[in-house]
Image: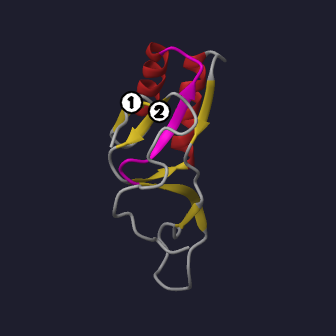
Amino acid sequence: MHRGSRKGLAYRGSTVAFGEYGLMALERCWMDAKQIESARVAISRQMKRHGKLWIRIFPQKSFTKKPLETRMGKGKAPVEGWVAVIRPANVLFEVDGVTEAVARECMRLAATKLPIKTKFISRHQHAA
């Protein structure tokens, strides 16, 4: 798979569509499957099986890596992992069925697991 372009804003997936509260990306990155999973675990543990969680991103882009101390050439390297392309304004996670205080704390814990700056948003106070 080609590296592609990370420029521009996210026009699709930039509003809270399923839940009441969400976590919006303010920077661009390639988010690894492990980072998404660790944020999901942090949210789930904080919610203590109350409410519902939606993960709005999916790691569908493969990236390759040559083994260490390998000479150049000899074709493309094997797939190393999977990433989701994140652009500013992407909604990453959404929660519903919990109070705003719990949702805020869930998203704060999830944000510490992620490599980018994020912002807590709600369905009512619409973010641009």
Left or right? Give the position of 24 relative to 75.
left
Residue position for label 1? 120
- Which secondary structure lies at badge 1? strand
Q: Residue at x 45, y 25 (%)?
A: 109
Q: Residue furthest front?
A: 124
Of residues 33 and 98, which is closer to you in this image? 98
Placement of the C terminus among the 4 image quadrants: top left
Q: Is residue 98 magenta?
A: yes
Q: Residue furthest right?
A: 49
Residue position for label 2? 22
Query: How are the colours assigned in the image?
Result: secondary structure
- In the rendered image, residue 117, in percent from the top left (x then y), is placed at 33, 40
Q: Earlier in the sequence, mark 2 or mark 1?
A: 2
Which contiguous range is marked in magenta? 87-99
> Which numbered dot is residue 106?
none
Does the residue at mark 2 contact the one at mark 1 (Cβ under 8 Å)? yes
- In the rendered image, residue 73, in percent from the top left (x then y), is placed at 50, 85
Of residues 34 and 67, which is closer to you in this image? 34
Vertical arrangement, residue 19 with respect to residue 75, above or below = above
Vertical arrangement, residue 28 with respect to residue 100, above or below = below
Sort mark 1 into few (<14), some (14-19) or many (20+) by Cα contacts within 10 Å.
many
> Which of the 4 image quadrants contains residue 120?
top left
Placement of the N terminus among the 4 image quadrants: bottom right
Amino acid type of the residue tagged 2 in the rendering: Gly
Amino acid type of the residue tagged 1 in the rendering: Phe
> Which of the 4 image quadrants contains residue 81?
bottom right
- In the rendered image, residue 72, in percent from the top left (x then y), is placed at 46, 82
Sort mark 2 into few (<14), some (14-19) or many (20+) by Cα contacts within 10 Å.
many
Q: CA distance from mark 2 to mark 1?
A: 6 Å
- In the rendered image, residue 80, in percent from the top left (x then y), is placed at 57, 61
